[in-house]
Image (cartoon, grey):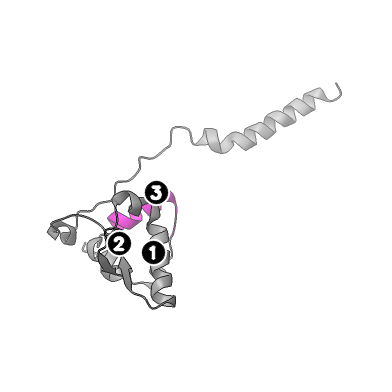
Amino acid sequence: MYNGGKILLGLFIFLAVVTFPFYNNVGKANVAPKPSIDTPAIQKLADKKCIESTAFMKAEHMQLLNQWRDSAVRDNSRVYVASDGKKYIISLQNTCMKCHSNKKEFCDSCHNYAGVNPYCWDCHLAPKEGK
């Protein structure tokens, strides 16, 4: 075998570089955040329920908000009919943020954990939170 040592050294360096992200992060996994739903508006609700189920909202809120945006802006339709038949006004600020007024503890905790930076607040006003 010609230059076998150099080939093996090259393979070792290649594997070390390719696998670096994996072994560099071993043991550094963060605990998933638990968004706070302790707001005055939620505490006043007799039935502490969002417009859809918790599982749906965790998995699909991004798609729902995009559908709401398209429906409100493009189709001028501002009523959302939930899966239980109840109707809600399509509004991030007046429907969603009415209950989830704690943006830092609710929205930002998960978005920071997931490393995403949604552009919601490029157009909408972020809720003012008490200090």
Is any part of residue 45 visible from this angle?
Answer: yes
Q: Is residue 126 left or right of residue 29?
A: left
* Nearer to the camera, 39 or 24: 39
Mark seen at residue 85: none
Q: CA distance from mark 1 to mark 3?
A: 20 Å
Q: Is residue 48 left or right of residue 63?
A: left
Residue 90, percent from left and from top: 32, 70
* Label 2 sits on residue: 82
Q: Is residue 120 above or below residue 7?
A: below
Which residue is drawn at the image coordinates 69% and 28% (left, top)? Answer: 12
Callout 3: SS: helix
Mark nearer the N terminus (1 vs 3): 1
Residue contact between numbered discs 2 and 1, judged by CB atoms under 8 Å: no
Residue 116, percent from left and from top: 44, 55
Give the residue type at disc 2: Ala
Mark 2 neighbour density, 10 Å: few (under 14) some (14–19) many (20 or more): few
Q: Is residue 33 left or right of residue 16?
A: left
* Label 3 sits on residue: 113
Which residue is drawn at the image coordinates 33% and 74% (left, top)? Answer: 78
Mark nearer the N terminus (2 vs 1): 1
Q: CA distance from mark 2 to mark 1?
A: 13 Å
Mark 1 neighbour density, 10 Å: few (under 14) some (14–19) many (20 or more): some
Which residue is drawn at the image coordinates 43% and 36% (left, top)? Answer: 28
Residues drawn in magenta: 104-117
Image quadrant containing the C terminus: bottom left
Residue 23, percent from left and from top: 53, 32
Mark seen at residue 65: 1
Mark nearer the N terminus (3 vs 2): 2
- In this rendering, which labeled residue sits more in front, label 3 or label 2? 2
Image quadrant containing the N terminus: top right
Residue contact between numbered discs 3 and 2, judged by CB atoms under 8 Å: no
Whether the magenta-drawn stretch holds residue 78 is answered as: no
